[in-house]
Image (spheres, coloured by chain):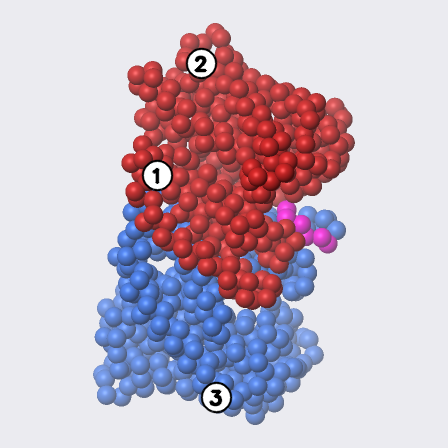
Chain colours: A red, B blue
Amino acid sequence: MIRSVLPRFPRSLILLVPVLFLPLPLAGAGGDAGLPNLLLTVAAMLVAGKLLGEAAERMGLPAVLGELTAGLLLGAGVLGVVPAAGQPGADHIRLLAELGVILLLFEVGLETDLKEMFKVGPAALAVAAVGVAVPFALGYLYWLRGPHAGTADSGDPVTVAIFIGATLTATSVGITARVLGDLGKMDTAEARIILGAAVIDDVIGLVILSVVSGIAAGGTVTVAGVGGTFAVAVGFLVAAVVLGNLLVPRVADRVVRMRARGIVVGISIAFALALAALAAQVGSALIIGAFAAGLILRETKHATTVEHEVQPVAALLAPIFFVNVGAAADVSLLDPTKPGAGAVLLVAGTLTLIAILGKLVAGWGAPWVRFHRLTVGAGMVPRGEVGLIFADVGRQAGLLSETTFSIVLIMVMATTFVAPVALKIIFARRGG
Amino acid sequence: MIRSVLPRFPRSLILLVPVLFLPLPLAGAGGDAGLPNLLLTVAAMLVAGKLLGEAAERMGLPAVLGELTAGLLLGAGVLGVVPAAGQPGADHIRLLAELGVILLLFEVGLETDLKEMFKVGPAALAVAAVGVAVPFALGYLYWLRGPHAGTADSGDPVTVAIFIGATLTATSVGITARVLGDLGKMDTAEARIILGAAVIDDVIGLVILSVVSGIAAGGTVTVAGVGGTFAVAVGFLVAAVVLGNLLVPRVADRVVRMRARGIVVGISIAFALALAALAAQVGSALIIGAFAAGLILRETKHATTVEHEVQPVAALLAPIFFVNVGAAADVSLLDPTKPGAGAVLLVAGTLTLIAILGKLVAGWGAPWVRFHRLTVGAGMVPRGEVGLIFADVGRQAGLLSETTFSIVLIMVMATTFVAPVALKIIFARRGG
């Protein structure tokens, strides 16, 4: 299938050629970014991200892999178009990337059907719990005990190991749902369990992220501290959704009837931003608030209208986040001729193996229900967006070294690459 | 008609109440903005802008007046939610506002039918020429000779006077088109001439802005310098549209056939950003490039698709610009009990009168064609968005003092308020 697509490749990639020339005017401006250069950088990120995303989709892979690859190309290691942290313009790109993540999680919330989730209930919860606990434990123990040549993490070893464990827990609903949809398997028992478990995983993952962010800010790990952050995150989500479902529907009815241009997109995105800020101010994570805003609007009569209006904005800004994450990776690690590269790649390979095996066993997490266990396990493998958000928080907090961040990025990309391919093979063997 | 609308007012304004409480958490954070506070600020700007925009529309006035009023409320003089220049977060808000203007002009370009414009041709050109020349000359002479108590402009008097003249030249296509549409008068001879002339005015206005920005950056006015900048702006527009119409349609056909999510909005906005940056780099204005990008995509088969996708993004970011402009105004000028306030308000009133009379005479600019001259003249009066962009450039360049900027803002708001009301009365008297 890859072969049948390759001949079309060069045609769309022709559009990428101008992007390759962007470093010239950027360099010509003498190092100072200024608004025009910032706009050129954003334009290059959008064009490269969208076109490599398109190329990935044509190869049957998730678009996010293309966007990360675009980041690797535009980053400091190759073309140097995206400014590294501290360079002029980097803080502005960072703001757009943060808005992109907030809108992405807002969209995930808008697409998350809480009622459907409660229906698959116990089985999905069991699968999700195993799929969170096993990878976390394996990742934590591996990082705490193993030899990690050249990673040079500066933080407290226990904290770093918790972070690594946490990045392994997420499951990307979006990628799995897309693959199942493409294969026409959305109405199978396995699909319902995978999606239910993936949503629960996202919620657990977001809560873990709050805890881990708290640790990253505070520096030390105490049972009371972890418990408190956990309670705040869960409490915020529950309180926001309960209060929101009481107050928001009537306001939404009123706003939708207004006629000012862009009133729906303006007010609903303002709501997501405000809840994100509120979540951060009570000590949880921004994206918990954005996710809660999506869940709340999902329960109104106007979810489709809101989604339709928010979608172009999210589709515009989310790639900025993924390209920016890709640009932060140290591509020289992938050069096998570099001294010490073998050891680093071995660590990345082991972490990827842990990530895959840890999620595969989740398929056996609900022994009292009948379903194809390997299918469910494989469907849980891709880490995708949420795993990347974790890694990025760790890097921003200065907890993960450049090398460790790049290793985690390799793990996320590898699982996101493996899962769609594995699911296709499994369904083909089962005679779907 | 205003009376029939007033009873509905309070219901929508209830939603504004939370915005009034925003200064509390913002102040509580101890002066440092940080991401959560920035998000709250943006949310407040969006909610206040959209709701007051809605209120304006219900009163039969352009939404932009509501957005400016929202800015006055959120600015330093009243609630202090929007950070003033130099305060934390101000540069980030500025970036979002700039992206908003770029997208707005991109949209205006997408909606500008060059062929229709060439059809009304000579009459519209004559009306536009008079409507640019008379207000510019009157404004320039008034500012150069008149006594301007308390304005305290620091720049070279000739440059400042040119700037004031320039802000008087624009005509807002959007506002006039909207009012004519609401009145069901789009198919009249007057409407065609007004819209043709308004578009030509926008183009002339953008070119004047390039010239004036060049003056603001350079500081001195020479005939060669003005001629050079004028040539660059016109040359850029013509070259971009001609080259773009040759190259872009085939690329657009290819992009529209791609299936990656958000590929149309991503690539087309990247195109607008890149042309904006290019225009700035060759010595013209950002928005000339964005406008050219819109004109080019308008001529492809996919204009409607692009417009549909870009609209929510523009509707989200453009209000950030107008609220930010409103927030920069010095509201204490409007306080009649303040010493010296009378003199300043007199200057603002005179400038408004010049702005209205200067455009009204444009109706008599094409004596060889038969149409209702007062209707056309009144239709040319609103300065709207383009006038605000001018004023903002002057303020950013440090050319206009706070007081002068606020006077220009009063003039723009007054013309934008007067024109829809006047057009409705004129059409009613003519027995439409």
Amino acid beneath label 3: Ala
Secondary structure under tag 3 reads helix
Q: Quadrant of residue B94?
A: bottom right
Secondary structure under tag 1 reads helix
> Mark 2–mark 1 contact, CB under 8 Å?
no
Between residue A350 and residue B421, name the one nearer to us.
A350
* Mark 3 → mark 1, Cα distance in angstroms: 54 Å
Amino acid beneath label 2: Arg
Residue where numbered disc 1 is placed: A58
Residue A5 is situated, as x and y percent measured from the top left of the image, at: 31, 38
Residue B143 is situated, as x and y percent measured from the top left of the image, at: 55, 87
Residue where numbered disc 2 is placed: A373
Residue where numbered disc 3 is placed: B224
Between residue A66 and residue A115, name the one nearer to us.
A66
Within 10 Å of disc 1 (Cα), the crowding (few <14, some 14-19, many 20+) is many
Residue A395 is situated, as x and y percent measured from the top left of the image, at: 64, 40
From the viewer's perspective, is B416 left or right of B428?
right
Foreground label between 3 and 1: 1
What is the magenta range? B31-37
Between residue B173 and residue A389, name the one nearer to us.
A389
- Residue at image x 28%, y 53%? B253
